[in-house]
Amino acid sequence: MLVPRSTADSGFTLPADRRAYGLLLGLFLLSMVVAFLTQGTYDSGDSINHYLYARYAFEHPINFLESWSKPLVVELMAGPAQLGLRAVMLLQCVLVAGSAWFAYSAARSLRLPWPWLAILFCYASPDYFRIQFSGLTEPTFSLVLIAGVALALQGRAGVGAAVISFLPFARSEGFILLGVYGFYLLVSRNWRALPWLGLGFVLYGVAGLFVYQDFLWVFTHNAYPVRNESYGQGKWGHFLISLPNTVGWVLYGLFWLGGLRMLWKWAKPATRLYPGKFTAELLLVYGSVVVFIGAHTIFWALGIFGSFGLTRVLCCVVPLVSLIALRGVEALTALVQSEQARNRVRIGLAVAVVGFLFCGARAAFRWERDFGRPSEQLLADEAARWARSQGALPHVVFHHPYLALPLQVDPFGAQHSPMPAVREQSWPLPVGTLVFWDDWYAVMEGQVPLETLRNNPHYRLRWRRAMPRNRRKPTADSARIAIFEKL
């Protein structure tokens, strides 16, 4: 059923729902088209690894309950992954569309003018758009998070709590945000909804009894140690300063305006038009964003919980950030008197948000960088072709996740060994084994520098290539891959 237009929508002939349907459908179809055209995979590491866990989950069922790969993500991806990585990208497009729709629903519950702008803001966040074309966990996490928040704003906090209970099984930060949601339920005295926050943990705990014989496997088999010296640590302002790279500079400005408007309303209770929604918005929208970014800031600054300072994690809260940015739009439109002038301001801001994507800025879209095939993958394809041209593929060693695709090797199977097998004397490799060394994963994660293989008389170099990472600047850093044979 279509909802009549609010006064904030005056001057437009389409009811709000129909406009939102059309916008979401158009942007969703655009994402699907890009999913078929793109040659990139967002990154060549975790994006591919998550896909591989899902692709081989039926052959290795333990992948369904693996802490690092995230059970909920593997379960969603396992089916599409049998059709290939591009099918997983199409699934991600569906997840992002669902997140945008729940953001719109939340905006309507908050009585925000032009709530369908929340959909546009989700898709106009450059990194959130790019991450659709990957196998990463952020789209799943963002959908579960915004769905739980939207349901609470609609007065269905119990259902929202049940949904949010699965958040830790999409990404580990979900445990922290469970606390935010639980605090909201306590403040709002919604006692009956509190037990539903344990639903996901109980279900996965029971499943863990059959796999690990351990109800608490989520903690006892945690993939993220408190300390991880190999990743290091960074500056306190890293994530907050990097947010413009995720949402773009225009949305970043609106985000801060929205935050300031919320502080103003908090300081002046008489200005709250809908006091019943204020607490939910303050804790679930603003609170979740602050706690999420704050937690990652602490992890990176202290070098704990395996934080590598990757700013892509900010994509998890983009649907919530879109709501805060919409409050920023409200703050700007409040400066003008007539509704016609307010509509012009909103249109101008929408054009600026979309226009930023194509302005050529570093945070904006760049086709070759964002949707082209990176040099390391081109090298991996070339290395795999050479290896296959030598005859039947023998036992292989590699640490670069992408190599599993062109080699068509199950990385969890008996034909493959990880790079540490090269230096482990108790882990003998058969004669004829091909070792695929690369200049990042083999060194950083496999702990095998090139000299280890070159100086070992049991290995001989068979193939070696290099390619500039930025092919437009060939004098810059190059990606390198070398193949050694075990004698």
Image (cartoon, helix red, strand yellow):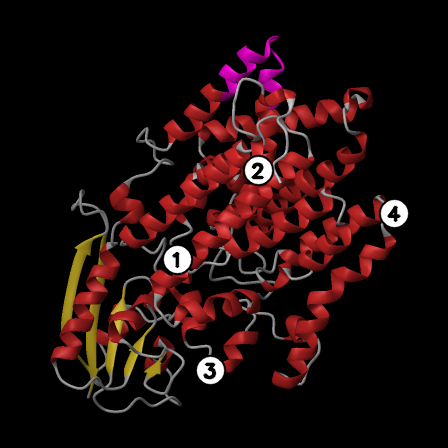
Is residue 372 part of the magenta span, yes or no? Answer: no
Give the main secondary structure of the magenta stretch.
helix
Kindly identify which residue carries mark 2: 321
Q: Nearer the viewer, residue 459 or 474?
A: 474
Kindly identify which residue carries mark 1: 89
Inter-mark Cα distance, 3 to 2: 38 Å
Which residue appears at 12% of the width and 82% of the height? 390
Placement of 83 over or under 428, stated as above or below: above
Which residue appears at 38% of the width and 88% of the height? 427
Inter-mark Cα distance, 2 to 4: 26 Å
| Earlier sequence position, callout 4 versus callout 1 | 1
Magenta stretch: give its range. 330-346
Neighbor class of circle 3 (other Cα within 10 Å; few <14, some 14-19, many 20+) is few
Q: Is residue 251 left or right of residue 468?
A: right
| Earlier sequence position, callout 2 versus callout 4 | 4
Amino acid on which disc 4 is placed: Arg
Amino acid on which disc 2 is placed: Val
Kindly identify which residue carries mark 4: 189
Neighbor class of circle 1 (other Cα within 10 Å; few <14, some 14-19, many 20+) is many
Give SS at disc 4: loop
* CB contact under 8 Å: marks 4 and 1: no
